[in-house]
């Protein structure tokens, strides 16, 4: 039999696929209409203004400094600090006052009276309502600008080694959730026989272990992640208690409790359920497990919805249930895909009926993902400019593209599924036509130990024959390859989705960049374009760094970096860092860690330039584990 995919033709499988294509077209149309007419909203806090404004020069010392944010934040005693030119506290060291009115979120700190002229630095750090730590700094001057000895923080809130480990735990948590929920749903809905398959049991149990371990790590690191950035503070009992009093802390504890219920569900699924032979009893138990498991899965998904983007901003009461549905659909699709991959590669018993049932589940999941994704895009993006001009919007475009690729690969998998039925039946008939082994001698029958040994040998021989038949089936091999490709794309898709949950939504970034009436107009300037050759001294260590800073003025700027090799082609490097220093005012270095957009192209948005002047731009390029160089160049900004 030819191993090529069948020619296109009418089949029950193609009808859902045609519907999927129609759905994709409708999604694109609705997505465009929603974005075109969407208004501004709020989520993921950002500084939108201050009084005095960033870079302002005031005639007399103000009585207080106020900061305005795009959404509600959680503040502590040292959330807002004002430092004089010598680095001493200029504020009264009291907890910030909540000056919010209506939809305006504003906090302020009182200043000491009789402050001398000079440049003052305002450093702030808080926790956004969607659980993400935020921080920043800016300067203003009384009378006239002056030199300052204040060194701005070199590490952003949520950064450093603690931030790296916390982010790894976040990725692991989403992956564990997908395997736990998707694997369990695959067994109950698509392939009940999988409850007795050891590879399926391992997949689900490993998903539970991964999610549990990641949740514990996030709970312990929550205090240093949002505060000091030191691993030692993970075991600070007072800090842990303060975390438990917050919305993210309560969500993590709730998730751990629900994972206890999930452990009981797994024990029943792969214990009592797997051993049950009576079909009626098994059907009743299937219904009970589906209801109980659905409640637990919904609860676990809600621990994300209640503490991240969906829990704040407009229509939060609608957004949180929508977010739960979105997460469950992702788990059913991607977790089921992982389960199907394991079943095709590690078990000989899965048949075409289970694959067809998963095809129906996957189609339903795609419908739910499309509907909930449209709504989430409207809330978090809001405009075409935010879709194309912000990191969140660019990640969203990448996610949509990955889903399109995944659907295209899935189309080939469904075509292989259409041919799997006959080959599966043929394989089963071939195994049933195997001649029975000769009857055992009476001496063997009389020896129970010898009989058990022969039974194990026959079972191993039968499994080997099944595996040989399975591996020789070109339809099953084609399906395995296409499902493997689906799984590879799905892993990237899950990573991008996780990145979106920790990225500032596009329309909030635009709102913050646009400022508020309380902020004065930034100083005039023009785009900055720099070209800096470098040589790290190692192999392929020569190249050129090109930097664009727009609009090149005080306040928020977009920074783009391109690296070209000695051959003039785009060059990727394992590490790229920048720092901005205004030496005449002792400001900086202000660290900038751009994100890689494409080969040889990095970008950073909302780069704050607190004051106009001749800024030194340091660029560190590392081309290998040991080859690194730092180059610098001055540029007039503002």
Image (cartoon, helix red, strand yellow):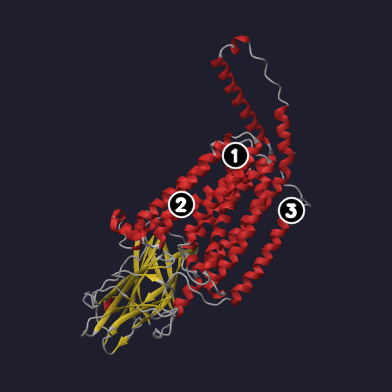
Q: Is residue 153 left or right of residue 264?
A: left
Closer to the camera: disc 1 or disc 2? 1
Q: Earlier in the sequence, mark 3 or mark 1?
A: 3
Label 2 sits on residue: 172
Which residue occupies the foreground of this view, 122 or 632? Answer: 122
Tell me residue 303's x, y (percent): 47, 58
CA distance for labels 1 and 2: 24 Å
Tell me residue 231's x, y (percent): 31, 55
The answer to whether mark 3 and mark 2 are in CB contact below 8 A is: no
The quarter of the picture where the N terminus appears is top right
Q: Is residue 204 left or right of residue 612?
A: right
Near mark 1 (Cα within 10 A), the count class, few <14, some 14-19 or many ≥20, is many
In the rendering, which numbered label is found on residue 194? 1
Q: Earlier in the sequence, mark 1 or mark 2?
A: 2
Which residue occupies the foreground of this view, 219 or 584? Answer: 219
Please report the residue visible at 21 percent of the width from the left and 75 percent of the height from the top. Answer: 88
Q: Quadrant of residue 131?
A: bottom left
Q: Quadrant of residue 85?
A: bottom left
In the rendering, which numbered label is found on residue 162? none
Please report the residue visible at 54 percent of the width from the left and 65 percent of the height from the top. Answer: 396
């Amino acid at each position: 039999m030819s191993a090529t995919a069948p020619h296109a033709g009418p089949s029950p499988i193609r009808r859902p696929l045609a519907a999927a294509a129609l759905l994709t077209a409708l999604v694109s149309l609705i997505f465009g209409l929603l974005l075109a007419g969407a208004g501004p909203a709020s989520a993921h806090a950002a500084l939108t203004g201050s009084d005095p404004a960033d870079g302002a020069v005031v005639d007399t010392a103000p009585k207080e400094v106020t900061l305005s944010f795009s959404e509600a934040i959680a503040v502590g005693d040292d959330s807002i600090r004002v430092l004089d030119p010598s680095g001493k506290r200029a504020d009264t060291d009291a907890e910030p006052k909540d000056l919010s009115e209506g939809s305006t979120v504003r906090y302020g700190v009182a200043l000491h009276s009789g402050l001398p002229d000079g440049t003052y630095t305002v450093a702030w750090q808080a926790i956004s309502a969607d659980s993400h730590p935020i921080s920043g700094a800016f300067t203003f001057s009384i009378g006239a600008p002056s030199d300052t000895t204040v060194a701005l923080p070199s590490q952003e809130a949520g950064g450093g080694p603690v931030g790296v480990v916390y982010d790894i735990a976040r990725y692991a948590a989403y992956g564990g959730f997908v395997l736990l929920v998707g694997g369990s749903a695959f067994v109950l809905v698509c392939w009940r026989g999988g409850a007795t398959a050891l590879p399926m049991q391992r997949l689900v149990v490993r998903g539970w272990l991964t999610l549990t371990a990641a949740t514990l790590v996030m709970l312990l690191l929550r205090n240093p992640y949002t505060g000091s950035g030191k691993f030692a503070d993970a075991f600070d009992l007072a800090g842990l208690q303060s975390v438990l009093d917050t919305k993210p802390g309560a969500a993590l504890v709730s998730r751990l409790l629900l994972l206890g219920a999930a452990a009981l569900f797994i024990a029943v699924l792969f214990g009592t359920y797997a051993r049950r032979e009576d079909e009626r009893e098994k059907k009743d138990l299937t219904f009970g497990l589906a209801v109980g498991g659905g409640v637990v899965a919904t609860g676990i998904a809600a621990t994300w919805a209640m503490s991240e983007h969906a829990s704040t901003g407009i229509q939060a009461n609608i957004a949180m249930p929508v977010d739960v549905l979105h997460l469950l659909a992702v788990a059913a699709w991607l977790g089921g895909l992982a389960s199907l991959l394991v079943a095709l590669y590690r078990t000989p018993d899965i048949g075409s009926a289970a694959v067809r049932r998963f095809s129906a589940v996957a189609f339903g999941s795609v419908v739910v993902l499309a509907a909930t994704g449209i709504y989430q895009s409207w809330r978090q993006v809001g405009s075409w400019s935010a879709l194309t001009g912000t990191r969140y919007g660019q990640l969203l475009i990448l996610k949509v593209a990955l889903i399109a690729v995944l659907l295209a690969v899935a189309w080939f998998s469904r075509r292989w599924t259409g041919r799997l039925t006959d080959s599966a039946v043929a394989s089963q008939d071939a195994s049933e036509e195997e001649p029975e082994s000769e009857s055992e001698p009476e001496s063997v029958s009389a020896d129970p130990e010898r009989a058990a040994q022969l039974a194990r040998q026959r079972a191993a021989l039968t499994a080997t024959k099944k595996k040989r038949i399975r591996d020789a089936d070109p339809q099953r091999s084609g399906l395995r390859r296409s499902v493997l490709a689906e799984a590879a794309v799905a892993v990237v898709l899950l990573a991008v989705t996780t990145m979106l949950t920790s990225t500032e939504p596009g329309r909030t970034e635009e709102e913050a960049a646009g400022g508020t009436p309380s902020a004065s107009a930034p100083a005039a300037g023009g785009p900055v374009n720099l070209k800096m050759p470098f040589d790290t001294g190692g192999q392929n260590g020569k190249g050129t760094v090109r930097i664009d800073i727009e609009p090149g003025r005080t306040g928020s700027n977009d920074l783009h970096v391109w690296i070209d090799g000695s051959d003039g082609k785009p060059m990727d490097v394992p590490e790229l860092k920048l720092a901005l220093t205004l030496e005449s005012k002792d400001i900086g270095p202000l660290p900038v860690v751009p994100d890689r957009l494409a080969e040889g192209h990095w970008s950073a948005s909302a780069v704050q330039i607190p004051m106009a002047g001749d800024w030194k731009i340091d660029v560190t390029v590392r081309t290998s584990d040991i080859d690194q160089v730092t180059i610098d160049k001055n540029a007039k900004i503002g």
